[in-house]
Amino acid sequence: MRLFAGIAAAAVVIAACGGTAAAPSPSPTLAPTLAPTVAPTPTPTPTPANTFKAELKASNENPPITDAEATCAGTATVTFTATSAKFDVSITGCPASTAINIGHIHEGAAGVNGPVKIDSTLKAGDIALTAGAVTFSRTNTAADPALITAVMANPAGYYVNFHSTLHAGGVIRGQLTKG
């Protein structure tokens, strides 16, 4: 009987130490696999292929402006679609008496005066400068698609020009560059 008791005790020890006598333990239940959560990527803001800029200066006019309005300057961003031209403009540094009346894109290289090609739609009395400055947007929704294509193909051959009451031929101007 002692032999049987010894065998039984050995079986208990083997089972306690992880031997083959132990009953298998159930495997844990796994949660269903879920796709990883991906945080949304912010939309990049690259410069679109149809955006152009111009640094507007009185000294770029032909002839250059030399009176009190010579202090006028600004920037223009022009964004094209197939049939429209949007002008985002900031003008600064002008005398308080300056009135900006019209603006458009002309065809012509730097220093060369040329014909109007795309109007900004700005008309006399549409804007008023405050402390010699103004920021505004205008969109020409009926721009000629052939002219838009020509400007986009050769921006350096075109300039943005804004005209004042004192300088009907233009007070600030800048060649278009890829934006």
Image (cartoon, helix red, strand yellow):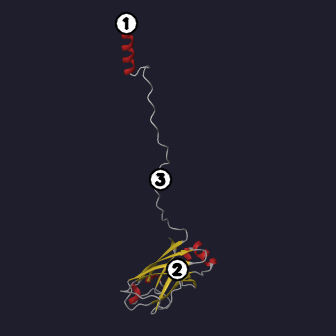
Q: Nearer the viewer, residue 3 or 65?
A: 3
- The part of the image, by quadrant, that contains residue 141 is bottom right
| Percent coordinates x, y for residue 2 in the rendering | 35, 7
On screen, residue 145 versus residue 123, left or right, reads: right
Distance from label 3 to label 2 (Cα)? 46 Å
Q: Judging from the image, what secondary structure is the residue with disc 3 in? A: loop
Above or below, 33 against 85 in this view is above
Q: Nearer the viewer, residue 19 or 47?
A: 19
Query: What mark, if any, has residue 111 been given in the picture?
Result: none
Task: Identify residue type, mark 3.
Answer: Val
Type of amino acid under label 1: Met
Q: Residue 58's quadrant in the figure?
A: bottom left
- The label number, if any, that marks residue 1 in the structure image: 1
Of mark 3 and mark 2, the one earlier in the sequence is 3
Q: Earlier in the sequence, mark 3 or mark 1?
A: 1
Sequence-wise first label, 1 or 2:
1
Q: Which residue position holds label 2?
A: 159
Residue at 38%, 7% (x, y): give it: 3
- Crowdedness of circle 3 by 10 Å Cα count: few (<14), some, many (20+)? few
Q: Which residue is mark 3?
A: 38
Q: Residues within 10 Å of mark 2 (few under 14, many from 20)?
A: many
Q: Which quarter shows the N terminus?
A: top left
Q: Secondary structure at mark 2?
A: strand
